Image: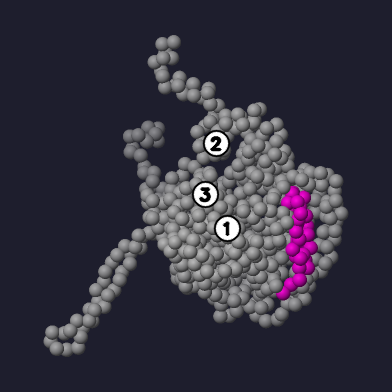
Amino acid sequence: MNNASTSSAPTTANATEAEAPVSPFPLHSSPFGPSSASGATVRAVNDEFHGDLLEISLGPHHPSTHGVFRMNAALDGEIVTKLKPVFGYLHRNHEKLGETNSYLANVPYTDRLDYLASLTNNWAYVHAVEKLAGITPTERCEYLRVILGELGRIINHVCLVGFLLNDLGTSFTPLLYSLRERERMLDLLEELTGARMMYNFFRFGGLRTDVSADWLARLKHYLEGLFARYLDEQDALLTGNEILLARTQGTGILKPDLAINAGFTGPGLRASGVDYDIRKVDKYSIYDRFDFRVPLGEHGDTYDRFMMRMLEMRESVKIILQAMRDLPDGPVNDPKAKSRGLRPKAGEAYGRIECPKGELGFYLISDGTPNPYRYRVRPPSFINLTILEDLCLGQTLADTIIILGSIDIVLGEVDR
Amino acid sequence: METLEQIRDRIVAKFGADTVTLITNPGPSAQHSLLLVAHAARDIARFLHDDPALRLDYCSNATGVDWPDKEIVETVKTTQPDPAGGPDKVVETKTKRIQPGCLEAVYHLYSIALKSAEPVIIRMRTANRTDDVTLPSLTPVWRSCEFQEREIYDLYGIVFTGHPDLRRILMWDEFKDHPMRKDYVGPDDYEWEPTPHGEVLERAKAHYPTPPASTSPKSEE
C-alpha cells in the first residue's frame, strides 16, 4: 500500500491506461482523426456503434492492397464503419529529385511513377514540358504517340481486370489469361524500346526512335487476332458471370456529384455516368481526328468500374487501328526541338492527359535554368483514394478489397 | 468559358478590388492565374464553384511552391555634369534589398459541367515562410483538396485552417522538417556504416568519430 502511494507516477500511468485502452494500431497515432490521444478516439467509436468494434489494419504488405498500402478499418461485425487509408511507405520524394534533375533526365523517372503504364506517364510529362517550352511535336510523332499511349492503356487495363478478379478470389485463371496477353504486348514493346517496363521512350517534340513498318504490322496482327480473341474470351467468361455479378453489382456505389467533387477521374468517374474524358475535352495531341466512343456507366458500382475497363480496351484497339491506317510519313523528331539542355523561358505550365487511371498532370515552373524550379505530379491514384472511405462505408470487408481493386491504384504513383 | 479577366472582374464586383490580382505568366503556355487574398479566399472559391456561369466544380491539382527570400540588386543610372566641362558622366549606384519570401498554394480548377479545356488557376500566398504560414483550406469547397492539402502541409509546412484532418501524409509523423522547401538540407548520414569508399568513410567518420581509446571495448581485449 505504502509503496503504491509513494511511487505515484507509475500508478497514474496504469490508471489512465486502464481507463482508455491503448489503440491496437502499431503506429504512433490512431488513424481516426487528428486528435491522436491514444484510446480516446477508440472509445468514441465504440460509443457510436453500441457494439463490439474491431479495428483491423490491413496491409501494408497484404497482397490485396496492391503494394505498400494500408487500410485502417473499424469493423462492426463484418461491416466497415470507418476506414482510413495510410500510405507513404514507398515515398522517395520524386518531386524533389525532379527539381534537381534536368528536364530530360526526368523522363525515365516518370516511368517509375506508375510502372504499369509507363508510356502514358512519359507522355504526360513530355506534354507538360512541351507546353512550358512551346514545342510542337511532329505529325508522325503524334500518331505514334497515340498508338503507344493507347497500347499503354490496354496493358494497364489488362492488368487491372486480372488483378481485380484475383481480389474477388477467382483464384488464378483470369489473372493468368490477362498476364499472358500483357507479356505478348511487353514482348513487342521490348523489341521497340529495349525495356519491358520502364520504356523511357518519349522525347520533347518527338520520340526516341521511329517505329518500323514491320513492328506496326505485327502489332496490328496481334490486336486483331489474339487480343480480340482474349477480349471475347474474357467477356464470355466473366462479364455475365453470376458470381461476378453478385459480388460486384451494388457494391461501392459512387454518386456522380461526390465523384466530381472529390476529383475522381478516369474510368472510375465515367462509371458513375459523368461524361468526362480529357481526350475528348482537351483534344490534346490529335485525338479529335479519331472516331471513338467514351463508354459510360449507370450505377457507379464496382461492376460498372470493371466494365469500363473492358469497354475501353475495345475502344483503344479501334483508335490504334485508325492511327495505323492514317500514319503519315515524315520525321519522328523535329530537328529544331531540343531535348538535351532544354532551358524553357521563365514561366509555368500545367499539362494533363487521360491516363489509364485518370487524369495525370504535371505542373512545372521554370526559372530559366536547365532544371525545373517546381516539378509537381498530379497523380490520379493518389487523388482517387480520397473517397475510398465513402465507397467502403457500410460494405463488408470482403467487398472493400474489390472496391480498392476497382479504383486501380499503383503505389509508386500514390507515394511518389 | 469566360476569360480570366472576366472572372477577375466578377470577383472584384462581388468581393472588392483588393481581394484579387491577376498574375501574368510570361511563358509560352500563357496560363495566367489569380492571386487571392487569404482571408476572402474560401468565399471566392465557393463563389467560383457555385456561380452558374463558371461552375468550376472540379479542382484537379493543388500544390505548394516555395519562394525563399531573394536578394535583389537594383541599379540606378544617374547623369552628373562634369565639373571640368567635359561630357556628362553616367554614375551607377547599386542598391540591395531583400524581397521577403513566401509559401504559395496553387489550385488548378476545371469545370466538368461546362467541359472547360483550360485550367482556371488560383493561388494564395502566406505572409512569410517562418511563423505566419496559415492559409484557409479549400477542402470544404472541393473535397479533392483533402489529401493534396495534407501533402502541402507535409512537404511545405503551410497550415490550412478549416481542414478536417490535417496530418502528415507522406512523411512519418515524427519527422520535423518540410523537405520540399528550397532551403531544406537532407541528412548526410544515411551511410552510417563505415565502408572502404573514401568519401563515404570521411562522412561516416565525421558523424561517428572514433571513441577515445580508454572507453573503446576493443582496446580492453
Q: What chain does mark 3 sit on?
A: B
Return the x and y of residue B105 as percentages of the image width and height: 48, 57
Residue at the top extreme?
A1
Asked if disc 2 and disc 1 are in contact, CB closer than 8 Å, the reply is no
**Magenta segment range?**
A289-318
Residue kind at label 2, given as amino acid type:
Ser
Whether residue A340 is situated above or below residue A7 in the rendered picture: below
In the displayed structure, does residue A27 sit left or right of residue B200? right
Q: Are marks 2 and 3 on the same chain?
A: no
What quarter of the picture does the C terminus of chain A occupy?
bottom right
Mark 3 neighbour class, 10 Å CA radius: few under 14, some 14 to 19, many 20 or more = many
Q: What chain does mark 1 sit on?
A: B
Q: How many marks?
A: 3
Q: Which residue is mark 3?
A: B150
Asked if disc 1 and disc 3 are in contact, CB closer than 8 Å, the reply is no
Q: Which residue is mark 1?
A: B49
Q: Are marks 1 and 3 on the same chain?
A: yes
Q: Residue at x 53, y 26 (%)?
A: A20
- Is residue A308 magenta-colored? yes
